[in-house]
Image (cartoon, grey):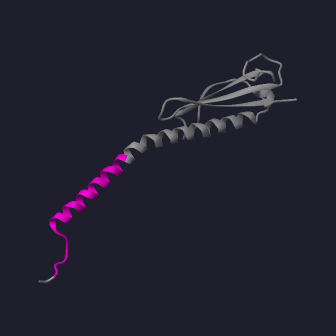
Amino acid sequence: MTARRGFTLVETIVGMMIIGISFYLLMTVFITITPKTNLDQDTNTKTFLAQEVLEEYLAKGFAALVDVSPTAFPAPFNNYSYRISVKNVQAGDLNTDVGLGTNYKNVTAYVWGGNLSGTYEITTLDTTY
């Protein structure tokens, strides 16, 4: 008897089934991960924009820190907006606005927009002596 080369029909069908099941499992993983990737990208963009606008704003100096009404970012981030809230606070309570005349300001940048809902905020404390 001579040796035959190749696969039998049963081996070919089993191999195709294994490949099909593997492909299905991989596609399920990709479909599950894609929305989370979009959420992570949107969160990272909002974080970056909040940090950027806060750093630029704080560079103006202590005396120039006042509230900023909602403003859109320039392109390519024009689908995101921000506002800045400034509270004059005291050393004993850094969250309660006490009006003018303190050496501490609680500054918060709020960023919203993009593909997903939700607002990201970043807060810092600025002081002068």
Where's residue 126, x and y in %? 78, 30
Q: Which residues are magenta?
A: 3-28
Q: Nearer the viewer, residue 94 or 19?
A: 19
Residue drawn at x 66%, y 38% as measured from the top left: 51
| Left or right side of 47 for 56 | right
Which residue occupies 47% across, 43% down? Answer: 37
The image shows residue 110 at horizontal and vertical percentages of 61, 29
Residue 6 colored in magenta in the image:
yes
Q: Residue at x 67, y 28 (%)?
A: 108
Residue 73 occupies quadrant: top right
Q: Is residue 94 above or below residue 38?
A: above
- The kind of secondary structure the magenta stretch mainly shows is helix
Q: Residue furthest bottom?
A: 2
Q: Is residue 117 left or right of residue 15?
A: right
Q: Position of residue 25 (x, y in %)?
A: 33, 50
Q: Residue furthest left?
A: 1
Residue 1 percent coordinates (x, y): 11, 83
Residue at the (27%, 58%) spot, across then down: 18
Q: Quadrant of residue 94?
A: top right
